[in-house]
Image: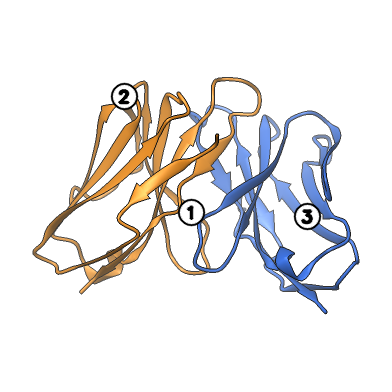
Amino acid sequence: DTEVTQTPKHLVMGMTNKKSLKCEQHMGHRAMYWYKQKAKKPPELMFVYSYEKLSINESVPSRFSPECPNSSLLNLHLHALQPEDSALYLCASRGPRDPSNEQFFGPGTRLTVL
Amino acid sequence: QKEVEQNSGPLSVPEGAIASLNCTYSDRGSQSFFWYRQYSGKSPELIMSIYSNGDKEDGRFTAQLNKASQYVSLLIRDSQPSDSATYLCAVKVTGGGNKLTFGTGTQLKVEL
């Protein structure tokens, strides 16, 4: 089963709000990713967790705060966002180390910042 | 120079034809290559991965890799209107820490 789930599907928030995006996978994968995707652009990597530790932060502003409570869960905490942060936020998980290193995406959270 | 390049399209093919999508990459040490299909408003869906030179077939899809020429392609046989989507090429580059570098995607339109 190659399923990654994300909640909520849609989120509208004001610039002063605090909200969280959630991601879950039950494939036993030990690497999980957050991406941001704007319309007609490819996914843009934000964070990578490997074995529940943050391994890559692509110089993301501190108003985005990732958290990996356990190997199956990944959160993205949002605070004081800007309208330009409106995008599709994608979570992905990666299979075991082998030549393929396939990444599987969740359905995404469509975020609108007012 | 972009690391992963794709023609943005749109690529229009008639129903039943073969659609050929191409991708070139700049890092000779790249190890693994992926094709994702993305419908408008949806998330990317992995359809093929390839890491050895040659062809890899899965149903109507064939991925082709030529590391010497640094290109990877995706052939879709018997194209259907449901194949109309954006196809993203992604490459795992050397020393990239398990990051994928994506191309900008090719929009495919299969016409009735």
Within-10-Å neighbours for mark 3: few <14, some 14–19, many 20+: some
CA–CA distance between discs 1 and 2?
Answer: 22 Å
Q: Which chain is blue?
A: B
What is the three-letter code of the residue carrying label 2?
A: Glu
- Measure how far apart labels 2 and 3 are at the Cα level: 36 Å
Q: Name the residue beneath numbered marker 1.
A: A43
Q: Hey, what amino acid is under mark 1?
A: Pro
Check disc 2 and report its element: helix, strand or loop.
loop
- Name the side, left or right, on which B100 lies relative to B73: left
Q: Which residue is mark 3?
A: B22
Image location (x, y in percent) of residue B62: 83, 45
Amino acid found under the numbered disc labelled 3: Asn
Q: Quadrant of the N terminus of chain A?
A: top right
Density class for disc 1 (Cα within 10 Å; few <14, some 14-19, many ≥20) is: many
Q: Are marks 2 and 3 in contact (CB under 8 Å)?
A: no
Query: Same chain for the residues at labels 1 and 2, yes or no?
Result: yes
Quarter-of-image position of residue B32:
top right
Does A85 appear above or below A100?
below
Q: Position of residue A33 (x, y in %)?
A: 40, 39
Q: Element type at marker 3?
A: strand
- Residue A46 in sight from this viewpoint: yes
- Is there one chain holding both mark 3 and mark 1? no
